[in-house]
Image (cartoon, helix red, strand yellow):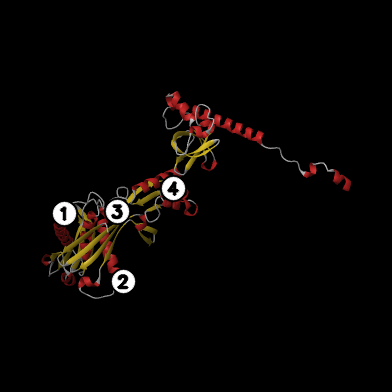
Amino acid sequence: AHGSALFTRGETQALAVVTLGGEDAAQRYESLAGDGAARFYLQYWFPPFSVGEVGRVGAPGRREVGHGKLAERALTPVMPQRDAFPYVVRVESNILESNGSSSMASVCGGTLALMDAGVPITAPVAGIAMGLVVGDSEHDAVILTDIIGLEDALGDMDFKVAGTPKGVTSVQMDIKVEGITLELMRRALEQARRGRLHILEEMRRAMPAPRATLPAAVPKIRTMSIPMVKIGEVIGPGGKKIRSIVEQCGGEDNFSISIENDGTVTFMSRDEAAIEVAMGLVRGLVVEIAAGDRFVGKVTKLLPFGAYVELLPGKEGWLHISEIAIERTEKVENALKEGDALEVAVIEKGRNNQFRVSRKAVLVADAAGGEGAGAAALPEAVLAEARQAAIAADKKRSASRGERRPPRPRSRASEPADEGDQKRD
């Protein structure tokens, strides 16, 4: 648990516990509108011992689900937006003693536990249950504040009101009479407001505001947005790419990543460095690289006629020996070594995200000054010149390969028959 609070009011006591997690901790549900996932939910537990009884403890019943939903609805309006607080929040309310409204105790305990966990709620929420005893006329009716079990059983109304100092966030009413007048409702709401403000003041003394920092045990969460058309590219065939990202960042025990249908990617880990690595890998998979873009890349492999340069995580460019420097480069290893960082520009984008890059074009643009010096992309004139040089280098290399190709051996059908064959014929 990342936050907790023990709330006691009279003979009613609730232990509220808050847990923060990633998207995989969201509560999945099915409805007539389809499948969904709740990023904030409150689960209410009412064991038999809370009312001095012995009974079987099993799955939550209709009453527990209803009370939990009432308390959840009271707290939902003050929960932070996802862009401000990316965590999934689960509140568990355990009723330890009950002789009053345990659902309203869950609201008060849940508020304190949320603030203890560092959840930046917009305002504290408290709840109180109002009762009613009707006499011979409306003027004889008595509004009861914070009713206990006996008053609930013998009274004519159970009216639960929860809210902040500025307004009401949820209500629920049970009545045993045929109806209730507007005047009685006004009296009940005003009396509930005074009682709610009193409880909020007591809560403020215990926890004036949410904690400024999250507990050390809470994992770090970062989010980013990618185009929806790129979701498949990040996941990869059969989830190959996304599994590779998880493995590179410490495995499933230390890192998790989730992608939603709208392109929101969530990273969660206790290691901030692992999250940075994962975000870089995802950016590299979804970024659109165009001819002329400049990158500071790292040399990953040397070959006799060029080198491979990592432009972004997961994306490499081919640097031909003729594009390493302005002057002629005799050997690649004389100018570069693996691990070197150098600035290159993309001069051509081929099929399957293959890129041809040039360092010479960057040096030429910076030496000339003006428009191309230090720019994020090369001027078109410099880019065109680099492309022509690359084409010429390809033709020269193809020609040299053709000269070195050994002559094709003649087939036996074209060879003259030897003397023995002639005699046998």
CB atoms at circles 1 and 3 under 8 Å apart? no
Q: Can you identify the residue that label 4 sits on? A: 228
Label 2 packing within 10 angstroms: few (<14), some (14-19), many (20+)? few
Q: Can you identify the residue that label 1 sits on? A: 204
Q: Nearer the viewer, mark 1 or mark 3?
A: 3
Residue type (three-letter) at the residue carrying disc 2: Gly
Which residue occupies the extreme left position in the image?
140
Label located before the other in sequence (4 or 1)? 1
Q: Quadrant of residue 405?
A: top right
SS class, disc 1 = helix
Q: From this view, report whether residue 419 is shown above or below residue 64.
A: above
Q: Nearer the viewer, residue 187 or 169?
A: 169
Q: Is residue 147 left or right of residue 261?
A: left
Q: CA separation, marks 1 and 3?
A: 25 Å
Label located before the other in sequence (4 or 3)? 3
Q: Can you identify the residue that label 2 sits on? A: 58
Residue type (three-letter) at the residue carrying disc 4: Met
Q: Can you identify the residue that label 3 sits on? A: 218
